[in-house]
Amino acid sequence: MNRKAYTSEDFAWVNWTPEIIKQKINEAIEAKKVCYAVIKAIAPSERTFTNTVFAIESSEYEHIDAIAQVEFLMHVSPLAEVRDTAQEMVDVLQKAIVDIEYDPDMYRAMQEYAAKDDLLVGADKELFDDMMRTYKRMGFVLEPEKQQTLKDNLKEIAELATGFEKAIADHQDHIVVRKEELRGLPEAYINGLKQDEEGNYIVTLAYPDYIPFSERCDSAPRRKELIDKFNRRGGPANIERLKRILELRTENAMVLGYPNHAAFKLEDRMAKTVEMVTEFYKDLQKIVTNPAKLDLQLLAEMKKKELGDSSARLAYYDIGYYIQRDKMQGYAVDDEVTREYFPLERVLDTMFDLYASVLGLQFVRENFPAWHESVLWYRVDNANGSLVGYFSLDLFPREGKYGHAMMHPHVQGRRASRELDAPYVTPTCGVVANFNPSSGTTPSLLSHNEVQTLFHEFGHAMHSLVTTAVHMSQAGTNTARDFVEAPSQMFEYWVWEREILKKMSKHYVTSEPLPDELIDRMIRSKNHAQGYSILRQLFLGSLDMTFHTATEPIDPVAVYADLYKQMFELEPAQDQLWPAGFGHLMHYDAGYYGYLWSEVYAADMFARFRTEGVMSPTIGMEYRKKILEVGSSRDEMESVKDFLGRMPNHKAFLADMGLASHDEKGGEASE
């Protein structure tokens, strides 16, 4: 499918003003109303897949890119007035979409087409089935009063969710420390901190400040102070927003006949039921509980020994610190030392070379307009020179910017119309992260964990760009929520391969690669504290599932504290508001389990690379064709089985986690 090359004019959206943002969203709303009016006016006898099902699918095609771009600017614009207006208009849009889509005449139109019983195959059948399932889950079989309740609740949820996320992004706090209180932290980190007029150092909640400080600062009181502030991100207002969102989600699920919100959400995912997720977690928790306890006991003993106090108890603000200490002592791996071998520019060049070789691509710098001077643009071509798409990199923190790492589409791939020779809309997307920027003569340096994060998000970008799915709702990362992470999680395994580590590393002063013995120690340390690490993921997923299986109003802060004590046998911070900063609750609701669930598929898929060639272009192209390009145009399990040549199982996952010896059964992954 031919894809159009873009010019600077196609990126005018990066400089949209608040007035233009309002105009674009209002135009999108009106255009969708017009499309739906046309669909509703068609006589039952004249209904076809094209004028009904595809017409609904494509009702936003004309303006969907502008919507995605406004949402992106809400997260990344350096201008507060642009972010605020974007949030305001996203709220307006979401409420309007609820009104437009909750239209019984649209449900009637779908029923009229369904009555024709046309023979559909492939992506068209998937689209029809998904659409019918969606209309059923919207409650159109219910009486009008209940439908109105659903609509009203969804509008309120949308507004509260946007406010929740914005409160996290806008949350600013810091601690002020003296030079002597920074013991344990490397000089390069200290030199990168801002100072106040008295020469004291300012440590913010931005990840490049927060993570090294919480893991390396020798001062337990100052670690506690910073971690306590971090655990209050979003503030009390977000707790109130969350309580209301949980109540509204529960009410809607029950109106629709589901026992709880989780049951509603899981119905159209790979896991299908709450019971399946519960069983998955229960099996995994049995495997990791003892290793996790041993990890925490080791950390507690380290603290007692260091303080010379047999009564000293491990605290929540000690865990990251002593994990790093143990890693340095046990494996002689210091994350701040290895950071010196991963200058951002070198990591990007190597990552591009690797993805290019394995997936049959080329990457070329472009000079398009950007929303910030640090943003980089690239064009992606196939090896034969034909166009694939474009992506941006926005990799450094700034005030008001989205605080985590993510990939966000700007333009989603799809065939422009039903015509077989219709052009394919060229996809573009953005990778967002918050790495340390360069400082003085020191370039931006990534920790190995940040390298892994970059590979992960770039995997999402490739998933988004190489898509060939005909329908936008099936393209790229538009897959089942509990599968979407698997393709990019698989790419993370590359950063643990010896050959790739050697090629990617280049000390920013000496230009030397990582020494072989250090690579050996890094690889051996891969599963360091893995029991605790997986238990923490189980904890977060269990917290999410507890919130969304509750049928009565709950106190999120109390639920967090109780579950933390139960799973870690530690006391949480007394004044924490941790759930107020748990942004995944807005769009990964009843879905956080998907990170571990999809990791099983990722490990199994990478096992094939490990067997047949870690950097094999042949296997890479097969992965591109069978997993990345198809998106959800066919069932995700069918794609995985097609690539593996068998049913997936969790053997590779447990082996990679170093937990295979703790497994009592080695069954297949669930369909």
Image (spheres, rainbow, N blue to C red):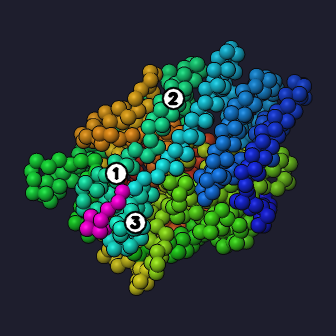
Q: Which type of secondary structure does the marked residue at label 1 adopt? A: helix
Mark pair 2, 3: CA separation:
40 Å
| Quadrant into which the N terminus falls | bottom right
Is 305 in the magenta?
Answer: no
Q: Which mark is residue 523?
A: none
Residue 182 part of the magenta-drawn span: yes
Q: Is residue 123 left or right of residue 262?
A: right
| Pick the front one: 364 or 615 | 364
Q: Residue 244: which disc?
A: 2
Q: Tell me: residue 142, above or below residue 636.
A: above
Residue 227 shows which numbered tag? 1
> Is residue 645 at all visible to an observer of this figure?
no
Residue 157 lies left or right of residue 451; in this view the side is right
The amino acid type found where label 1 is placed reads Ile
Residue annotated with mark 3: 196
Q: Is residue 380 left or right of residue 539?
A: right
Task: Give how far across and how far down residue 150 sits, in percent.
Answer: 63, 23
Q: Is residue 150 above or below residue 199?
A: above
Furthest residue to the bottom?
Answer: 510
Q: Which residues are magenta?
A: 175-185
Where on the picture, by quarter, is residue 147?
Answer: top right
Q: Going 55% across and 45% down the picture, which residue do you hit?
A: 166
Depth check, front residue: 36 or 291? 36
Contact between marks 2 and 1 (CB within 8 A): the answer is no
Instruction: Give the spatial CA distance, label 1 vs label 3.
Output: 21 Å
Query: Dot 3 lies on which element?
Result: loop
